[in-house]
Amino acid sequence: MAAALLTVVLAAFGLPVAKELSPSGFQDPGSQSTRAAKVLTQKFGQGDVQMLIVVASSDGIDSARAREIGTGIVDRLNDNPHVADVSSAWTSPPAAAADLVSRDRTAGLIVAGLTGTEAQQQTYAKEISEEVTGDRDGVTVQTGGTAMVNVQITEQSQRDLLVMESLAIPLSFLVLVWVFGGLLAAALPVAIGGMAIIGALAVLRLVTFGTDVSIFALNLATAMGLALAIDYTLLILSRYRDELAAGADRTAALKRTMTTAGRTVIFSATTVALSMSAMVLFPMHFLKSFAYAGVATVAFAAAAASVVTPAALVVLGDRLDALDVRRLTRRILRRPEPQPVPVERRFWYRCAKAVMRRALPLGLAVVVLLLALGAPFLGVRWGFPDDRVLPQSASAHQVGDRLRDDFVQNSDTAVTIVVPDSDGLAPADVSAYAAELSRIPDVPAVSAPTGTFVDGVLTGPPSAPTGENEGSLFLTVASTAALFSDASEAQLDRLHAVAGPGGRAVEMTGTAQVNRDSVDAITSRLPLVLGVIAVIMFALLFLLTGSIVVPLKALALNVLSLTAAFGALVWIFQDGHLSGLGTTPTGTLVANMPVLLFCIAFGLSMDYEVFLVSRIREFWLETGQSDNDESVALGIAYTGRIITAAALIMSISFAALIAANVSFMRMFGLGLTLAVLVDATLVRMVLVPAFMRLMGGWNWWAPHWLQRVHQRLGFNEAPKSDPDSSRQAEQVPS
């Protein structure tokens, strides 16, 4: 009852959280591109975010109707208190207006800078879009730009979340019915998953009071909340049934279950939470948000499974197996009740034995296969998300495509250079600097306060945004180099190599620089993050097993299990195979996503590792630490079905993300699905028994001084008094 009341309170607080979340957060807030953008906003009134409006007419933009509509929109934007600056194909100076007209002169562009917080910008952009969008006497008006990308990502993510829930919950319930048979037993894990999700949403809303949180954290909280809660409940229920099948009464069975499986749940949740918490070390709030969501979700999932599940087992008693669908099906089909099957005849026991008989060739074959599947990741290219993360039906995507295809200059390729301190700087120094920049390959023109420079020569007044104010100035460097290409990277290097005007420091912004800063922020922190994760995982597994071999094996195999997922991401979403699974391939991957995928999938791999190794260790202790192969086979026999079912349910939760219409969330869903399935099958059921067979008794080795540490700080269990008879009694229906 208390849990139900708490859930209601948390739901009332947490469910409105979507309104408080941000669709961005991919940039490093301490980078030079961010600092430069702040100067442009504060001193030059360029607006915090750009909104683009395309006015198109088959009669051309010079027709009376197109000009009337275009200038009318400009007038309304100038009267809007939330619009900082406006430029257009009809009202800007001729040199600047030329870049705002399509090649065939059938479309003109209006650029508006919006002010306010991110939430306010979305409100303003949506209001403007609803006001101006439409067809008027043969003139079509569409809206796009970063402002509309943010609006449409938020709206699309909320729709995707509903679709994901409608797919994942019923399919997970069907799998649980297959595992447990009883509808009531199957409903319990789903209910606990709902509690975990609601608790995580409440935590996310609480976090929004202090910092920005990405809206995409909702998808993770929903998918992981359902998956982990079901996993943990499944482990507890399965172990409870095993203890009952071994002849224990319900009280003793529950006590044994919670001291073994319950401990495993807490330990597993700790490993997953700590793995994801490492993402707070990155500066982008996109990654930080997933750390908040992940830790909160894991904590609520473990707490609900550990508290609510045993309480439900006590309250329900024999009614836990009520409404048994399998029993009803057998009666309808007139099939006999299944007979208990000895553990030695179970599929997973026989599978483990078969693998261990051919440990070396099977292990090598799987390693080679996973490395081959991961090979495409060697050709990964990093890029910053733009309008193409949205479906092609989104107006922001359509506007972006039109700019890339029909306009001579694409503002996304331009680099803006800010001189934060220009006091006392001579105009000649500015001109010399601009002239030098204009000589760089793939730079058609540089606009400075002193004029436009082409190939080192002054050609006229400024043709793109530029200015000087309050002791700072900025220049706009046009670029014909394709974004995220080698040419773009080389151009950026050459721009940085040019000394600032009069020796002054400069800072650059623009999509190319933002992408470089974001990638640098990730790669510079990545060794620290990976090191923290590795140390934490090693320490926890050592405390669990008392071995240094098992943790090292786990770290290596967990990394190996991710290779197939990483290779698939590059092959599909970067290179465009399988038609990018319905997305628009850009030739790049968002740098945040592989990092996010690694941290989450690595933690989930440890989840299954703890499930399996803890059971193997139980049998290892029971055998008096004398029969490694049998302990491995028995551990797999008793956890194989659980891990398989848990992986299937978890993959369903993550696969539901593939239905998302935001491309990098679809990529995230596919990557996690592949990682979970590969880990639960090829790694846990082939590589783990193969490795442990080859290592034999060395699996449990540690130096003497570490053995003493484990004796004092680690988890120790006494073996059962009569392991042979106990194991003979532990039989389950087939």
Image (tube, rainbow, N blue to C red):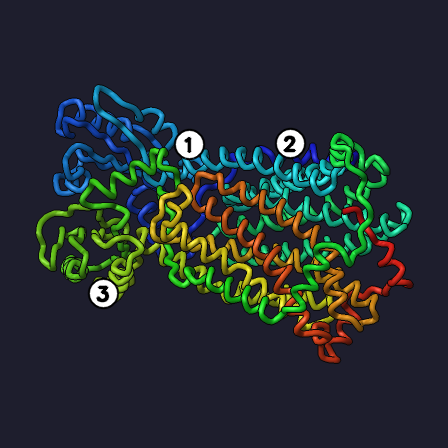
In the shown orientation, is residue 214 left or right of residue 648? left
Q: Are marks 1 and 2 in contact (CB under 8 Å)?
A: no
Residue drawn at 15 percent across, 58 percent down: 431
Disc 1 residue type (three-letter): Thr
Question: Which residue, given by chain and number where applicable, does mark 3 sit on?
Answer: 498
Q: Earlier in the sequence, mark 3 or mark 1?
A: 1
In the shown orientation, is residue 76 left or right of residue 434? right
Disc on res. 163: none
Q: Is 480 placed above or below 432 here?
A: above
Rendering quarter of residue 62? top left
Q: Between residues 615 and 538, which one lies in front from this camera angle?
A: 615
Please state the horizontal and vertical placement of residue 332, each as a whole percent of the image: 75, 30
Question: Which residue, given by chain and number where applicable, does mark 2 sit on?
Answer: 12
Q: What separation in Å lies between label 1 and label 2 (alpha carbons)?
A: 24 Å
In the shown orientation, is residue 67 left or right of residue 693? left
Q: Is 578 placed above or below 565 here?
A: above
Residue drawn at 31 percent across, 58 percent down: 507
Q: Earlier in the sequence, mark 3 or mark 2?
A: 2
Q: Earlier in the sequence, mark 1 or mark 2?
A: 2
Rendering quarter of residue 321? top right
